[in-house]
Amino acid sequence: MPIVEVTIMEGRSTAQKRAMVAAVTQAVSETMAAPVGAVRVVIHELVPEHYAIGGKTVGENPPGHLGGAKAQGDMKE
């Protein structure tokens, strides 16, 4: 039974998290030859003040400071 843990910053919509869970489950099922029903996905959501990069919490930095990796509309405002 594969167990995948995903750590993300809080703020994604329920629809985004569900889509990610479905995609991760499918990928793990295909690559690990595991039945879809056996794949477990655990999401850990971080509060911006509980994660730091370069000595500053994410909450201290302006939006988009993670290298602009997020697409517009990926996060709830």
Image: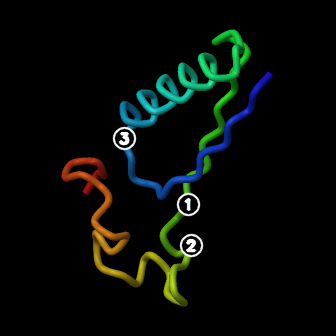
Quarter of the image where the N terminus is located = top right
Badge number at residue 14 = none
Residue in the picture at 47% in, 26% down: 23
Distance between the Cα atoms at labels 3 and 1? 14 Å
Tell me the kind of residue under disc 1: Leu
Q: Nearer the viewer, residue 53 or 59?
A: 53
Secondary structure beneath dot 1 equals strand
To which residue does mark 2 refer?
Answer: 51
Residue 33 location, x and y as percent? 70, 14
Residue 58 location, x and y as percent? 45, 76
Quarter of the image where the C terminus is located = bottom left
Callouts 2 and 1 close, C-beta under 8 Å = yes
| Left or right of residue 52, residue 68 in this image | left
Q: Earlier in the sequence, mark 2 or mark 3?
A: 3
| Badge 3 density bin: few <14, some 14–19, many ≥20, Cα 10 Å | few
Tell me the kind of residue under disc 2: Tyr
Residue lying furthest bottom in this view?
55
Q: Nearer the viewer, residue 7 or 67?
A: 67
To which residue does mark 3 refer?
Answer: 13
Q: Earlier in the sequence, mark 3 or mark 1?
A: 3
Q: Earlier in the sequence, mark 2 or mark 1?
A: 1
Residue 17 location, x and y as percent? 45, 36
Secondary structure beneath dot 3 equals loop
To which residue does mark 1 refer?
Answer: 46
Residue in the picture at 28% in, 48% down: 74
Q: Examine the image and state in which quarter residue 39 appears.
A: top right
| Badge 1 density bin: few <14, some 14–19, many ≥20, Cα 10 Å | some
